[in-house]
Image: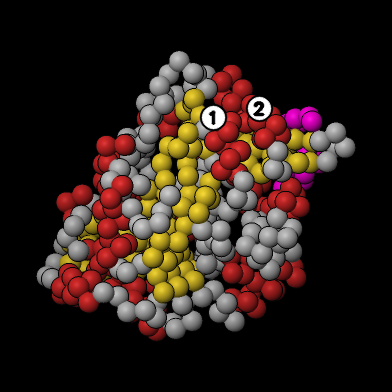
Amino acid sequence: MKIKAVNNHKTEKDFLDLPRKLYKNDPFHVMPFDKDIRAAFDPAQNVHFRNGDAARWILLNDDQKVIGRIAAFYEKDKAKADYVDNGGCGFFECINNQAAANMLFDAAAAWLKEKGFEAMTGPVNFGENESNWGCLVQGFEPQGHGMAYNLPYYKELFENYGFQLYYRQFSFHIEIEKPFPERFWKIAEWINNRPNYSFRHFDYKQADKFVNDTVKVYNEAWPLLKDDFTPMDPKSIYELMQKAKPILDPELCWFAYYKDEPIAFFFFFPDANQILRHLDGRMHLWNKLKFVYLKKKKVMTRMRGSAAGVSPKYQNSGVESGIIYQLKQVVDRNPHYKQAELSWVGDFNPKMIALYNATGATHAKTHYTYRYMINKSLPFKRFMPEKVDESAFPDGAI
């Protein structure tokens, strides 16, 4: 077997095409767009290159066939916020062969070590954590757009190499036609009728305002939940909204205000994977026409809640229920929506787990984010273990 750096058109094509071969007979896998993978590694398109770098490799067998791939990357700001100088690895795909996986992990770890890093977290994305984050270990079924999907044996490949569980990520499903618990709706109606509280959905005509409101709430809420917190870059939100524009329904992205000050947000997106599964990761003219046709046919019957935040002062105030109340009015007018996915919530966030349980949602999937200690003399630490409340975990979650 031989490792090759991705440094030309052919090796990049091999990097992009490997999942098409590995998942050829897997009915649940959805190919991401090639252009989106290229963009993740293009400094002109990915803002995370401003203070970071990335590298990619493919693995060939003795017959010169591609049998694996991986990427390694880092952002200096995020590394400084951690207790250890930490980089990331992701975009990992491999045949079921531990020796092959080890060569890929070795390449990523060696590159990060050369850059001065002492730990490697993966599989993660070279960007924000709302997409392509974690190794799927439970719930091998069709994934919502942006949620990582992999073959079941990947868990063993990571753990046998020496990766250790850093944190769990839970995803929940709500069957929209199923009534919510009565107590939940009483709280939701109460908060919606309280004076000084208001709720508004996203509007591209006021994109600057809503982006700034998102950043304000996020930067207030997440320092309490993340020891390695780094402030949100408004540009990343603009990019998310522009990227999602072909499928985004503004009435599924809601903000809560108290006396016109933003206090919470919750973003749902129609599940584009229900269309993308028919496109094989390519957007040529025929697939563009197919995309428009399938969108009009309303084949996107699922939505995914991919980002949320509540200012600390208003947590446990019921404002989250108020936002879900607003969403319920929208889906009642759009009966083609049948299911909502709430993904993902970390095992270090018991308040959000409790909220999802209160809606009557059922646990559907678990992903693991791992960490590998490059510098063996340093201790491994779980992500915020003092906040992990295993009694709050959904039944059957691993």
State yes or no: residue 10 in magenta.
Answer: yes
State yes or no: residue 20 in magenta.
Answer: no
Real-space Cα distance between discs 1 and 2?
15 Å
Q: Position of residue 356 (x, y in %)?
A: 32, 62
- Closer to the observer: label 1 or label 2? 1
Query: On the picture, is 285 further left or further right than 210?
Result: right
Please name the residue that numbered disc 2 is placed on. 107
Q: Is residue 6 visible?
A: no
* Residue 209 in the image: above or below residue 17: below
Tell me the residue at 79%/36% (across/down).
60
Query: Mark 1 packing: few (<14 Cα in 10 Å), some, or many (20+)?
Result: some
Is 155 in front, or is 34? 155
Query: The magenta stretch spans which residues?
Result: 1-16
Please name the residue that numbered disc 1 is placed on. 162
Q: Amino acid at mark 2?
A: Ala
Tell me the residue at 37%/79% (across/down).
178
The quarter of the picture where the N terminus appears is top right
**In which image quadrant can residue 272 be found?**
bottom right
* Residue 336 in the image: above or below residue 111: below
Query: Mark 2 packing: few (<14 Cα in 10 Å), some, or many (20+)?
Result: many
Q: Which mark is residue 28?
A: none
